[in-house]
């Protein structure tokens, strides 16, 4: 029942065990979910289409689709589209795209050549959800409450005080049923009535607030993206979720820990409806795991939307955002995110994962496959005074130092080059091995231009403000890398460069973490006061000329600087714009 995208490689190592796999293994051994023509493991990823997915959702996607893949089952993508006032087709489209970009799919090829499509919407089940609600009313398990929202909240009590029964709790079944039908017919305004479950006679005294006659249907006169104006009452999530699971034959309904207290209602509802003949046993079971708490980010939908709406960032796909579209534009790879989700594991205990773990997985994924390139980010002119003016010659370097099969790249050396500002010091510090000028009777330092010649610093130029604007050197013609005798020169400094005549000027965006505090929204902090002013810096860099052919989404290691990607939105043919994905080492921790 698995497809290619959702199938592990034949030589991949077995997945690490966790409590969810132990539960599934037990169910497999016991034959709990052996049913005709159905996989024994069916999971689902059920997002609300009211925003963009973030890195926390990536953990859930990898978990649900990964478990289904590893147990030869299937995972459904199901949209919980029950709140039309906040839902848009844009969010549906980006969620589908994000799931597929992460490497998963909900279409499952069958042995007969057909394909089972498992993209679902809660709105697919509106008729069944409504019919089950009428059943609950008829059996005395639900009633229409006509209290105001304020009275209902007051009568609900709190964790220390039992709730008070609604004055409408014992409303006659026929009356509740008729009002509910009139609600569906559009005869009442939003908030005028609400349908509530009645789990037991003493439910309002339950220590679990979620069992105190939870709301299961509300009036909402709003246009729905898929059903239009056919409905003006919509089911609540806690009611819709278990029923949708059961209708889709889900076996293991995996949620984050905040839904743990909702599980008793999940179980009660499916048991009650099964007794009414709506579902066959076994019904799905819900299991909870800890959500992803990642340092230096916020994952609250409300706060992410605030960053976008207040134009603190440039949109949902801003490379500083922890959204999946933001990570993708930043240059993260699906493989790195999958590796990260596997590495952090699955537990029932809340904890924090440091951002360096995610960045480490990214470096681990990029290092063996990112081609190398030369980029000068903070340019300073280098003039080789004894190199013939107007002359140039080719230098070469492997595309990847550990993969000769990837080939060789070439670039010219000429009289004038660009080097990094930090590769020259007028007054050198101890242990500095790059360019320094002559001092007294001591000659200037010798430095090898990587893949080129050994050079000796002879002087430098300053502008009227005292800034160094050029460094002068002489080169040794018999010292070119890879030529006989070049190894006779023993130098400690080795720097990168690009030819000033042919270098590609390019916009480069240097990204860092969006916040300076590892927990920007914890403990009542104002997360906007903790924004990192250096989270984005835009510079003009000089790149080796071959980089003009870089395609959007193509990733490179700019030697010495880190990993970069050609921006998927702003890059143009022959004019790439680069985003720094991550530095070569974790430089943020040292700041």
Image (spheres, rainbow, N blue to C red):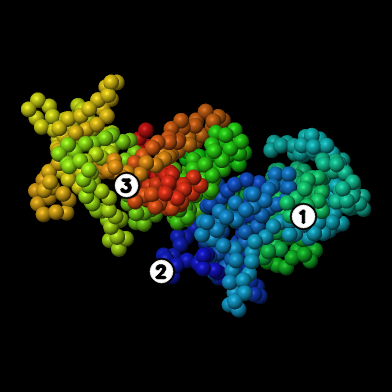
Q: Secondary structure at mark 2?
A: loop
Real-space Cα separation, disc 1 to disc 3, in angstroms: 55 Å
Residue 389: image x %, image y %?
A: 20, 41
User: CB of mark 1 within 8 Å of CB of mark 2?
Assistant: no
What residue does disc 2 label?
11
Q: Secondary structure at mark 3?
A: loop
Tell me the mark number nearer the camera, choosing from 1 and 2. 1
- Which quadrant: the C terminus? top left
For mark 2, does the 10 Å Cα neighbourhood hold few (<14), some (14 to 19), or many (20 or more) residues? Answer: few
Labels 3 and 2: the sequence-earlier one: 2
What residue does disc 1 label?
227
The reply to whether residue 478 is visible in this rendering is yes
For mark 3, does the 10 Å Cα neighbourhood hold few (<14), some (14 to 19), or many (20 or more) residues? Answer: many
The reply to whether residue 332 is visible in this rendering is no
Residue in front for this viewpoint, 190 or 200: 190
Q: In the image, is 228 to the left or to the right of 316?
A: right
């Amino acid at each position: 029942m698995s497809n290619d995208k959702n199938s592990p490689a034949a030589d991949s190592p077995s997945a690490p065990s966790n409590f969810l796999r132990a539960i599934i293994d037990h169910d497999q051994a016991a034959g709990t979910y052996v049913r005709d023509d159905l996989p024994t493991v069916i999971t689902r990823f059920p997002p609300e289409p009211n925003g963009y997915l973030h890195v926390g959702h990536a953990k859930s996607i990898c978990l649900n689709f990964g478990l289904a893949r590893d147990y030869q089952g299937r995972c459904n993508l199901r949209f919980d589209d029950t709140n039309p006032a906040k839902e848009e087709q844009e969010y549906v489209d980006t969620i589908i795209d994000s799931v597929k970009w992460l490497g998963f799919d909900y279409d499952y090829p069958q042995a007969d050549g057909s394909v089972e499509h498992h993209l679902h919407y809660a709105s697919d089940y509106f008729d069944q959800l409504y019919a089950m609600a009428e059943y609950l009313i008829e059996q005395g398990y639900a009633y229409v409450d006509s209290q105001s929202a304020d009275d209902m909240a007051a009568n609900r009590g709190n964790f220390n005080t039992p709730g008070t029964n609604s004055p409408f709790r014992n409303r006659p079944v026929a009356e509740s049923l008729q009002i509910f039908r009139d609600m569906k017919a559009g005869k009442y305004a939003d908030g005028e009535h609400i349908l509530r479950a009645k789990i037991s006679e003493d439910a309002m005294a339950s220590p679990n607030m979620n069992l105190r006659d939870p709301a299961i249907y509300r009036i909402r006169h709003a246009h729905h993206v898929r059903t239009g104006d056919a409905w003006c009452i919509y089911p609540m999530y806690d009611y819709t979720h278990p029923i949708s699971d059961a209708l889709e034959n889900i076996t293991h309904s995996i949620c984050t820990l905040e839904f743990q207290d909702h599980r008793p209602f999940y179980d009660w509802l499916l048991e009650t409806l099964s007794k009414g003949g709506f579902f066959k046993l076994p019904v799905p079971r819900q299991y909870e795991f800890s959500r992803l708490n990642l340092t230096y980010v916020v994952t609250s939908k409300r706060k992410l939307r605030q960053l976008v709406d207040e134009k603190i960032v440039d949109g949902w796909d801003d490379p500083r955002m922890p959204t999946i579209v933001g990570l993708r534009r930043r240059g993260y790879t699906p493989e790195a995110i999958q590796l990260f989700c596997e590495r952090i594991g699955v537990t029932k205990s809340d904890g924090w994962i440091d951002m360096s773990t995610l960045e480490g997985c990214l470096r681990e994924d990029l290092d063996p496959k990112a081609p190398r390139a030369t980029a000068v980010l903070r340019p300073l002119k280098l003039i080789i005074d004894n190199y013939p003016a107007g002359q140039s010659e080719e230098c070469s370097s492997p595309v990847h130092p550990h993969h000769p099969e990837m080939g060789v790249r070439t670039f010219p050396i000429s009289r004038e080059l660009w080097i990094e500002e930090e590769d020259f010091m007028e007054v050198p510090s101890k242990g500095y091995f790059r360019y320094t000028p002559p001092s007294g009777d001591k000659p200037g330092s010798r430095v090898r231009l990587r893949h080129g010649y050994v050079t000796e610093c002879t002087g430098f130029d300053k502008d009227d403000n005292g800034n160094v604007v050029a460094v002068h050197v002489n080169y040794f013609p018999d010292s070119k890398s890879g030529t006989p005798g070049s190894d006779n020169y023993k130098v400690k400094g080795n720097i990168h460069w690009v030819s000033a005549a042919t270098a590609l000027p390019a916009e480069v965006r240097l990204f860092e973490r969006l916040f300076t505090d590892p927990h920007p929204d914890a403990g009542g902090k104002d997360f906007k006061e903790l924004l990192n002013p250096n989270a984005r810096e835009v510079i003009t860099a000089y790149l080796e000329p071959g980089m003009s052919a870089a395609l959007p989404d193509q990733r490179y290691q700019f030697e010495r600087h880190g990993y970069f990607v050609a921006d998927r939105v702003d890059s143009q043919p022959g004019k790439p714009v680069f985003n720094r994905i991550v530095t070569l080492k974790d430089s943020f921790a040292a700041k």
